[in-house]
Image: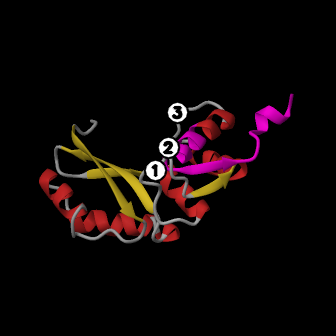
């Protein structure tokens, strides 16, 4: 028989660096999850993504057992890596702090395709470009769909 779901916990944890300190410990402890067991399993699964911020959705069952799904890094984090910046603009409509290319947007969209609410890579690229603009990044070049005319 299927286990009864007790709740969900959404966290953003650096790959291979989960530990019982906040924010992981208090969030899991509140639901009665074995914190060390989660940390060991998460760190084992994310050894190849050391230091990258990874969203994780933890499904907690009523018997205090759990499963988790690791998502791809957030688009904002990937955009900052591509632009080689620490953070986005405080006033994105006026102050532009860096730039990315449409090729960067395509690479990020292809990486995140499973987590995006889009059917095609082209529409995923538009979403990533919108995120870039809202962070104060310029998207350089002409979009690939405009050059095919």
Q: Are marks 1 and 2 in contact (CB under 8 Å)?
A: no
Give percent across and percent down for residue 123: 63, 33
Q: Are marks 1 and 3 in contact (CB under 8 Å)?
A: no
Residue position marked by numbered label 2 in the rendering: 93
Q: Looking at the image, is 30 positioned above or below residue 35?
A: above
> How packed is label 3: few (under 14 Cα within 10 Å), some, or many (20 or more)?
few
Residue at horizontal 67 percent and vertical 38 percent from the top: 121
> How packed is label 2: few (under 14 Cα within 10 Å), some, or many (20 or more)?
few
Q: Looking at the image, is 149 positioned above or below residue 18?
A: above
Quadrant of the rendered image containing residue 15: bottom left
Please report the bounds of the magenta region as a residue range. Answer: 127-149
From the viewer's perspective, is the residue at label 1 or at label 2 nearer? 2
Q: Is residue 9 covered in magenta?
A: no
Q: Is residue 72 visible?
A: no
In 3D space, how far apart are the residues under numbered discs 1 and 3 (Cα atoms)?
Answer: 14 Å
Q: Is residue 125 visible?
A: yes
- Secondary structure, mark 1, is loop
- Secondary structure, mark 2, is loop
Q: Earlier in the sequence, mark 1 or mark 2?
A: 1
Is 46 left, or right, of 17 in this rendering? right
From the viewer's perspective, is the residue at label 3 or at label 2 nearer? 2
> How packed is label 1: few (under 14 Cα within 10 Å), some, or many (20 or more)?
some
Quadrant of the rendered image containing residue 35: bottom left
Residue position marked by numbered label 1 in the rendering: 71
Residue position marked by numbered label 3 in the rendering: 117
The total number of labels drawn is: 3
């Amino acid at each position: 028989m299927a286990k009864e779901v007790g709740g969900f916990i959404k966290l953003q944890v650096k790959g291979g660096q989960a530990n019982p300190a906040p924010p992981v410990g208090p969030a899991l402890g509140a639901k009665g999850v074995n914190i060390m067991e989660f940390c060991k399993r998460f760190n084992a699964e994310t050894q190849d993504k050391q230091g990258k911020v990874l969203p994780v959705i933890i499904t907690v069952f009523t018997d205090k057992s759990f499963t988790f799904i690791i998502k791809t890094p957030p688009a904002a984090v990937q955009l900052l890596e591509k632009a080689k910046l620490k953070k986005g603009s405080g006033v994105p409509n006026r102050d532009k702090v860096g730039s990315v290319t449409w090729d960067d947007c395509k690479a990020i969209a292809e990486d995140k395709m499973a987590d995006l609410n889009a059917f095609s890579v082209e529409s995923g690229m538009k979403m990533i470009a919108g995120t870039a603009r809202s962070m104060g990044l310029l998207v350089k070049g002409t979009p690939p769909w405009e050059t095919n005319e």
